[in-house]
Each structure stands twice: as C-alpha cells, then as structure tokens.
Image (cartoon, coloured by chain):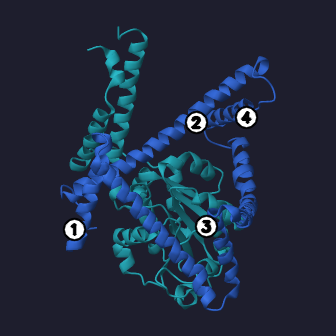
Chain colours: A cyan, B blue
Amino acid sequence: MSLAKLADIDRRVFYWILFIALMVPFLSPIGFPITLSPNTQDLYDGVTGDEVEEGEVWILNFGYGVSAWSECHPSVTVCTKALFREGAKIIITGTHYDVELTYNKLQDTCRADFDNKVYGVDYVFLGYMTGGESVVAQLGSDIASVYPQDHFGTPYDEIPMLEGIVDNADIAGVLSSDTGDYGGHFMTQWQSAYGTKLAEIGIAMNASTDLPRWQAGNFFGVSVGSRGGAELEQLIGELGEATTAMDSISVSHLLLILAIIVGNIGVITEKLGGNK
Amino acid sequence: MAYPTATLDVIGLWVGWFLMLMIYSYPLYKENVSYRFAEHLFIGITLAITAITNFSNIMRMCITPLMQGQILMIVPLILGLMIFTMLIPEYRWVSRYPIALMVGAGFGLGIRGTIKPNLQDAIIDTITAPTGGGLIDWFNYLWVAVGLVCSILYFMLTFEHSGALKTPTRIGRLFLMIALGGYFGNTVLFRFTMLTGRAQFFLQVLKLIPM
C-alpha cells in the first residue's frame, strides 16, 4: 500500500476508532498523571481558607447547558462544596435556558453538602435570566429587579437569605461558569465596575480568552474544562467524574495527534509523488 | 448519582441512549432516516424549551409585576411588542425604535467596563516585565512582546508590507497562525471532552461502569 493512501482514509474509520478508544479508559483506567495549574490553584485558594468568611454570599452563575456538563460541572461541584464547607451562602443564577437541569445535577453531585444546608437560608436558586450583558449589569445594581421571585415562585423579600441583599456590594464574589462569555460580562459589569471578586469556570475552547484575564488579575482564578475539574477534585481530595474522564480525554488527544501525523505523512508522500 | 430505579427515569435514560446513537449514526455511518428524525426532534424540543423558558421569564419579570401594580412595566412590554412589527413590512419601521434603544444601551453598557479590563489591564500585564522568576519568565515576556508588536504591525495596512515592514509583518502573521492554531486546538479539545461525556453515558446506561 502506498503511503499516499494515508491522506484518503475514510473519516468514518477515524470516528469509529475514536468512539471505541474513548470508552476503553472508562472500562480499564490508565491513570495518566494530572499536574496542577497555577490558575486552578488560585481558583481553589480563592474559594477556601481565609478568602471566604462564614455567612458571606456568593453568586454561582450557570451559563452552560447539559452538553457542557462534562466540561464545566466537575469544577462547579468542587467550588460549591468548598464554599458550603467554608460556611458561605450561595445564590444560584442561570443564563442558559436548561439551568433547572444543571441545578438538579448539582444537587446530585453535591448531595451530602446540600443535605446539611437549608433552602432559602443557606442557598437559593433564582433561576434563568435573559438579556446578556444588560441583565448582568442590572443584576449588579438591583438583584430583585431581575429576580422579583426565585425559581419556585417565592417572592424575593420573603426569602430569609436574601434579606439585606440588594446589589453587588452585598455579594462577596462571583463564580461564572459558562460556554459563552458571561464571565466577560461579569468582568466588565461587576469586577471592573465594582471590584467584585470574580472567577471563571470555562470550557477548554475559551481558555485562550480566560487565561489572559486571569494573568491580568481580572479573574482571581480560572478552571479550564474537564482538566480544571480534575485538578480541583485532587485539591479537595474527592476524585469524581472529571478525574475518571481525564484518561479518556488524554487518549482522544493522543489519537488526534496520531491522525494528524498519519494524514500529513499521506499528504507529504502524495506531494513527493508517492501516489504515482 | 446512582442508576435510576423509577420506571419513567429508566425509560428516559434509554430514550436518551437511543437518540444519541441515532445522532452518531451520521458520523459513524452516513446520513440516514434515524439521524434526521433525532435531529428534527432535538430542534423541536430545544425550540419548545426556549419558547417556554422565555415566556415564563416575561411573565415573571414583566407581566406579574405589572398585574401587581408596577405600571412602569408597561414600557418594556410595549417596546417588546414593537419588535414584532418587523413581521409586517409596512410597519417595520416601528421595530427600529426598540432595536435602536437596545443597541444604544448595549453599546453604552459595553463601553462602561470594557476599557479597563480588556485594554488597560491587558496592556499593563503584557508590558510589565517580570519582577522575579527565572529565565523562562523573561523568555515568555519577550516572546509575548515580540508577538504583540508584530501582530499589530500585520494589521497596519496604511503602508505596504515591504522593506522594513516585511520581516515583522511576516513574523506577525506567523504569530497569528499560531494563535489561531491554539484556538482551534482548544475547540477540538472541548468537542472531544463532550464526546468523552457521551462515551461515558453510553457505558453507564449499559451498566458497564457506575453512574
């Protein structure tokens, strides 16, 4: 077989190999080492220890849907656990329409921590908000105007935890987790405008946008995709779905590199006349 | 999270499993009826969820307060309804007013917080020399500085990219290609992670790995 044929392998062959290869590490874990990134360490440090005072209120924004659970949710789970264990209270908001599913998922993945907390006293789920950057800005100046009631219909002023919570000044920090740029909206409308502490739990695709913002000090920490989730799981000492998935993700990357090499060998051979 | 035991939950799980396979039948085999069916079902359900969520949102944020006596809520309601006039050609001009308001407000809000984090902080971080660290920090600092200057020069179209500008603009183009490669790599990484999630789900439903 001429090497030039390597450039013309049916893409379905690659997809089949990939789909099967991704499953193998789940059945038989390889245990690739995971090193800690400074941006993830900063995120963890920012939601633990002296950085969080008991009783202070944080906002956790879900800007991702079901499709990005594997990327964002492990990090969100660890940060929620960490904040709860430091005695912080959490306001959960959502900028993705299937926020309710993600909220239910969080209750599953942090079940033990939620069991020790009381809804309306330690945490509250305000639900979905629409309006992009405008609504994030409005949230900073008057939370109740965006959420006259919580997701379940309880009026804002009847929720004990929200008593005295009016605007950004009453919020200790924001964790924005999204597939888009809601982290950027919180950065321009909260962090830059009011100096609110802000961290981003983003998808790997947005790493090149998020990391410079962390380096410039706009985000106090950044978690990048599943990898960030696996690092956070190590830091909190409770290995979860991200750690399990990392082997599979690493295999997918190795396969991709292999495919690029094979394809290029084919193209180069073809150019050199190997197909003749 | 444990494997569900309620009948409806189990059915939901298996429906999801089959729909996933139907969608994957396109890249793994070829376009076919089952893929088309799953695709249309997905689009329909997504649109339905979006419509209901947005309707509930309007009810919660606007209609309910209006009914409770907050008469000013009539303003965003009217502005919102005005947008629908774009569906009637002879009254389309009416929709331009709420859109102009949205664009103006959005632009103003965007400007408010953009300059400091996106320009000032980013530039300061780029031009600040490392105070400590090792050789690698200085290498990174110079690498970014050269990349920044050359990339900006590449977009300076007032002068022809020849003579003294030839080399730096070529280097700038190289940096841009590397940056785009990085972006693409991150995108691929994200998609593969999503695929990994599906592979995990595939095995979990079959009870081959714990849920």
Q: Amino acid at mark 1?
A: Val
Query: Camera-side residue: B191 or B149?
Result: B191
- Along the horizontal axis of the image, is B207 left or right of A191? left
Comparing labels 2 and 1, the label whose residue is closer to the camera: 1
Q: CA distance from mark 3 to mark 2?
A: 31 Å
Question: Residue at label 2?
Answer: B179
Crowdedness near tag 2: few (<14), some (14–19) or many (≥20) residues, C-alpha within 10 Å: some
Quadrant location, the N terminus of chain A: top left
Question: Residue at label 4?
Answer: B152
Q: Quadrant of residue A230?
A: bottom left
Helix, strand or loop for disc 4: helix
Helix, strand or loop for disc 1: helix
For this orientation, the residue located farthest to the front is B90
Q: Quadrant of residue B170?
A: top right
Q: Amino acid at mark 4?
A: Ile
Question: Residue at label 1?
Answer: B10
Q: CA distance from mark 2 to mark 1?
A: 45 Å
Comparing labels 3 and 2, the label whose residue is closer to the camera: 3
Quadrant location, the C terminus of chain A: top left
Chain under numbered label 2: B
Q: Amino acid at mark 2?
A: Ala
Question: Residue at label 3?
Answer: A131
